[in-house]
Each structure stands twice: as C-alpha cells, then as structure tokens.
Amino acid sequence: MKKLTVILGVIILFCACQQTESEMTDEQRQEIASTITQQFKDLMDQPSTDNWVDEFLSSWVENDDKAWLGKPALWLNLMTLYPDQDKIYEVWKPIGEVRSSTDFTVDEDYVAVLSAESAVYVFKGSFTITYKEGTTTDPTPMSGSYVYVLRDGKWKTLHQHLSWKTN
C-alpha cells in the first residue's frame, strides 16, 4: 500500500508540475507589459484640451457589470462621491478649462500580467499643473495602480486608484 501511495504521489506531483498550453511565455508577458506602460504614458501625456475628459473616460471599460466606473459610476475623489459618468464629466470639464497642462513624471513602475486579458500597472512619481494664466505648481508626489482588461482588442481601465500628497 505504501508503494502504491508513493507511486500515485509521484504521478500526481509530475502532472501538477507540467506546463499547460494556456500559460504565457515571458515574451508574451513582456509585450503586454510594454503595451500597458505605453498606454498609461499616452494617457498621462494628453494635453489639457477641451475634450480631455472625453479622452480620459474613453479609456475606461464601458457598460460592464464588472466595472466600478461605468453606468452607474463610483468615483471617490477627496471624499466626493460621483454617482455616474455624467456627474464626473460635469465636475471635471471645468477643471480642464483652467489648465494648460498637467505633467506627470513616473519614477518607478511595474506591470503584473495576470493573463492574456488582464494586467495590473503600479507606479510612483509626481505631477505638476500649469494653469492658463501662467503659474505652475510645485511637483506633487503621487502613486497609483490601474487594473487593465482587454476588450475588443484594446486595453481598458477596469479600476484605478491614485494617491497624492495634499497640503
């Protein structure tokens, strides 16, 4: 009986250690990580234009039961609760109207590729805001994380968390 138990244990261990065909290669993971990093950079490098809120909200998963930012939306910002995307748009649109740019610097970042359809991006850095009247804020330390999912061939934000130092 002991021999049978040992043999079965070895067979189970051997089978459990086999790589399945669905596992991703390091190259595939790196390609996804590079895509996510570039997408985040492109989102943060957008100029403050009249349609910056549209561009930002278009990077989110739309109408997905799993998304916490859809319809209904939930955005907690400095203890302000926005119940839907329409309210976010209404509040954020005037913010862009007084800014000429918001410049982000990423000091450290990391992408954890969870699967071929999901990844987490984590970063630490800072940002400055330049207002249309000409003043620029001092750099503000910040950190954040994004959960991305692949939808219709595009990486979309499912969840975001940002923290920054306030005075």
Image: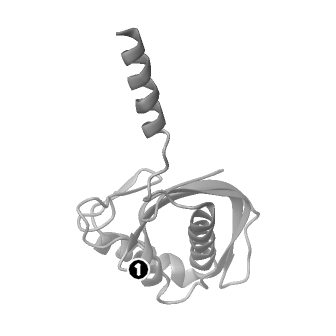
In this view, 71 is above or below 6: below
Furthest toward the bottom, the residue is 50
- 162 left or right of 132? left
Residue 132 occupies which quadrant of the picture? bottom right
Question: In which quadrant of the rendered image does the N terminus lie?
Answer: top left
In this view, 78 is above or below 99: above
Residue 16 lies, in percent from the top left, at 44, 38
Tell me, yes or no, if residue 147 can be seen here: no
Residue 153 lies, in percent from the top left, at 41, 80
Residue 49 lies, in percent from the top left, at 55, 89
- 135 left or right of 65? right
- 54 left or right of 86? right
Residue 4 occupies which quadrant of the picture? top left
Residue 6 occupies which quadrant of the picture? top left
Residue depicted at x 59% and y 83%: 46
Furthest toward the top, the residue is 2
Residue 86 lies, in percent from the top left, at 29, 74
Residue depicted at x 25% and y 71%: 63
Residue depicted at x 52% and y 84%: 97
Tell me, yes or no, if residue 118 can be seen here: yes
Residue depicted at x 65% and y 50%: 165
Instruction: Tell me the residue that label 1 is attached to.
Output: 153
